[in-house]
Image (cartoon, rainbow, N blue to C red):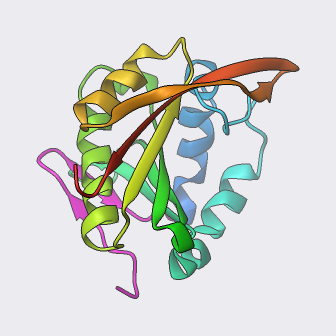
Amino acid sequence: MDEQPALKTERLLLRPFVASDALAVQTLAGDRRVALMTGDIPFPYPDGLAERWISGHPEAWAQRTTITYAVCLRDGDTLVGCVGLRCVERHLRASLGYWIAVEHWGQGYCTEAASAVVKLGFDQLGLRRIEATHLPGNSASGAVMRKLGMTHEGVMRSYFIRDSESHDLHLYAMLSTD
């Protein structure tokens, strides 16, 4: 698996991001409603960040540290979100992360895309554990995790700081043997 493979689901194409996706990433991920439901996406989303982020994907794939996919409708051109894994190779585990553009919320795209990436992680990358977290106010993300078959393992109290405010995170996980 030298080149990052595209993944197809019933309604989606998951493909590597390309430079021309940068403006859409800045616009979609930079929407306050999306950004503030994550621990990593800044708000406001600064110019040039999407280009730098995308440019690092090939090296991260080659080293298997981060696997990042553009979530697109099957036409491959309509970007609706992002899904990926941050891998800790020596422990055979990864953290699942995702975001979906607001206009595509509630359509099941996140679960469909995340399911494909979880399968890739277990079947092709040999992971033994995949975990994910969500903010207490993001029950939709928790629903995605449960639909994937993840188990709620607990709450990590005051786990990260955003805008000088401490936030808890709900932790979910699944094992390759589940």
Q: Nearer the viewer, residue 15 or 120?
A: 120
Q: Nearer the viewer, residue 109 or 67?
A: 67
101 to the left or right of 72: right
Q: Residue at x 41, y 51 (%)?
A: 130
Q: As displayed, is residue 129 above or below residue 157? A: below
Q: For the point 34% across and 72% down, which residue is it?
A: 126
Instruction: Residue 104: give x, y in percent of width and height.
Output: 34, 26
Q: Position of residue 125 (x, y in %)?
A: 36, 73
Determine which quarter of the picture holds residue 6: bottom left
Q: Is residue 149 above or below residue 48?
A: above
Residues in magenta?
1-18
- In this view, the residue in front, 71 or 126, is 126
Q: Quadrant of the N terminus?
A: bottom left
> Which percent across, then down, holds residue 21?
52, 54
Please tell me whether residue 91 belongs to the stretch shown in magenta: no
- In the displayed structure, would residue 43 be above or below residue 80? above
Question: In terms of image quadrants, where is residue 90?
Answer: bottom right
Magenta highlight: main SS: loop
Residue at the limit of the structure toward the right, as seen here: 164
Q: Is residue 45 visible?
A: yes
The quadrant in which residue 140 appears is top left
Q: Position of residue 120 (x, y in %)?
A: 29, 64
